[in-house]
Amino acid sequence: MHVRPEALRPPGHRSTASVSRRRFLGLAAGTAAGLGVVGAADPWRAGARQPGVPSPAAPFAAGLDLAEPPVRSSGGGMLETRLDARFGPTTVAGRPVTARVYEGSFPGPTLRVKPGDTLRVGLANGLPAGEGTNLHTHGFHVSPRDHGDNVLLHVMPGEAFDHEYAIPADHPAGLYWYHPHLHGDSNQQVNNGMAGALIVGGGLDESPGIAGLEDRLLVLQATEFGPEGAVLPTGKQSNDTWLRLVNGQLNPTIRVRPGETQRWRILNATSGTVYNLALAGHSLHQVAKDGNPFGAVWTRDRILLAPGERVEVLVQAADAGTFELRTLPWGEGFQAMPDAILATVVVAGDPVALAPLPTTLLPFDDLGAARPDNRRVLTFGVTPDGPTTEQSHYLVDGRTFAMDRVDQTVRLGALEEWEVRNATDEWHPFHIHVNDYQVVAVNGEPVPARGHEDTTLVPPMGSITMRTRFRDFTGKFVYHCHLLFHEDDGMMGIVEVVP
Ligand SMILES: [Cu+2]
């Protein structure tokens, strides 16, 4: 298996598993330096860049009003569109840059569909020579086969592939997203900007207390550009100097009237940045997670949002003023994320009467009392330290991903309980395709039933226990860590649903 040198030294995701593992990573850096990738002679390493200090040539515009990506909506039960993947010019925070993006847009266009629709996407690969890609509809309950949500495909440069997704009539309405999922290239491509929102209409859109609210989309991305505006290779980026972007903007202004309630749909479309979201002076009233409406509002002051996760929150502005939406410091050691401002909320204008929050939302299939047909235990791990240190990898159940191996076989229709254990001292967001699940316990302790989800942080040396029904679709799909460097490195497995 080919291992990119940069993959051995991901910013922010180096293991702190043990002293000897750290020593190994030092050796890995030495190896990479030998290849001229991250050596001391490298100007980025040697130079002027200090953590927390912006790039000297960074005329990115900040503070503009929040703008949203272009929207493409279905009509008459169909959305037929194209996604051209290219390494080329785009705009970030008002500045011309070069990166891998869809349709020249950072982030990509928002695709809006309804339950029962057919979504057709012509994916065209215009990336550099040798660089394959593919497309994942993250969170969609659709077939993983053939032209569906098939991430085992390789679409090579110059090639195109026509996807067709039949969205079930009972599909939960909410926020999903699309991004590339080619094993080995996911981290780089998503980090560059290849991501866009998928919104399924209906559901909460018509609920009392939510219908008619100002509905905003916030796509969170984090990346870094060189002085000439070219996106930096992931191995040369730093957790401390990533631009924390919202819809491709730096610290945009979100306008709200005093007393107004707004609905914000927030997507973490980064390759590996965890956000600890907080809005100064305001609570976040969460109504949905990962495209699934909650049964009731969950009010909190902070929301931890891992790569791949989505939340929908109601924000009630009280008095006029200016308030920062921030990600607060989170994590330890190599996984630590710094404090950063994401957006500025300006509450101003004619006041409106404060409306009560909805008390109940939408019912869901509570699996808490269900009897699973089968139980499994999966374990996230890292290669034990040893003398053959060049082959260190992130693992599931002691092995790296293999395209031609089925790791779990499940019967169609089965209700299963999976305990996902984390045998490392880093956090890993677990994600499974096609079928959502309900988390019933964290670290063995039962948790309240709020709704279903598809991406969940597993605590260091801890576990999550989830229940899921393998409904409607046979075929092969994957489960993995959504820190995409870890996924690319091997922390992924294949599940096959059989009749
Ligand atoms: Cu991970």
Image: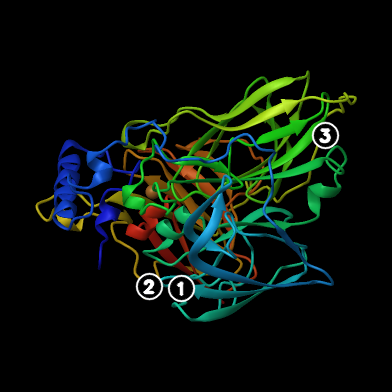
User: Mark 3 or mark 1: which comes first in sequence?
Assistant: 1
Of all residues shown, which one is farthest toward the left?
387
Residue 19 is at least partly visible in this image: yes
Rendering coords of residue 38 (x, y %): 22, 49
User: Mark 2 or mark 1: which comes first in sequence?
Assistant: 1
Q: CA distance from mark 3 to mark 1?
A: 42 Å
Residue under label 2, please give it.
403
> Closer to the camera, 361 or 252?
252
Q: Which mark is residue 358?
A: 3
Q: Secondary structure at mark 3?
A: loop
Query: Does mark 2 have its CB less than 8 Å from ligand 1?
Result: no
Looking at the rendering, which quadrant does residue 487 occupy? bottom left
Q: CA distance from mark 2 to mark 1?
A: 7 Å
User: Mark 2 or mark 3: which comes first in sequence?
Assistant: 3
Residue 480 vertical placement versus 130 (above, below): above
> Closer to the camera, 7 or 39?
39
Residue under label 1, please give it.
152
Residue flagged by tag 2: what amino acid is it? Met
> Tags 2 and 1 in contact by the CB under 8 Å rule?
yes
Check disc 3: other Cα within 10 Å, few if <14, some if 14-19, many if 20+: some
- In the rendered structure, the answer to whether residue 176 lies left or right of residue 456 reads right
Q: Secondary structure at mark 2?
A: loop
Q: Residue at x 41, y 58 (%)?
A: 188
Q: Residue at x 37, y 72 (%)?
A: 403
Q: Residue at x 32, y 58 (%)?
A: 489
Check disc 2: other Cα within 10 Å, few if <14, some if 14-19, many if 20+: few
Rendering coords of residue 194 (x, y %): 52, 59
Rendering coords of residue 299 (x, y %): 68, 29
Residue flagged by tag 1: what amino acid is it? Leu
- In the rendered structure, the answer to whether residue 331 lies left or right of residue 96 reads left
Residue 216 vertical placement versus 480 (above, below): above
> Closer to the camera, 174 or 5?
5
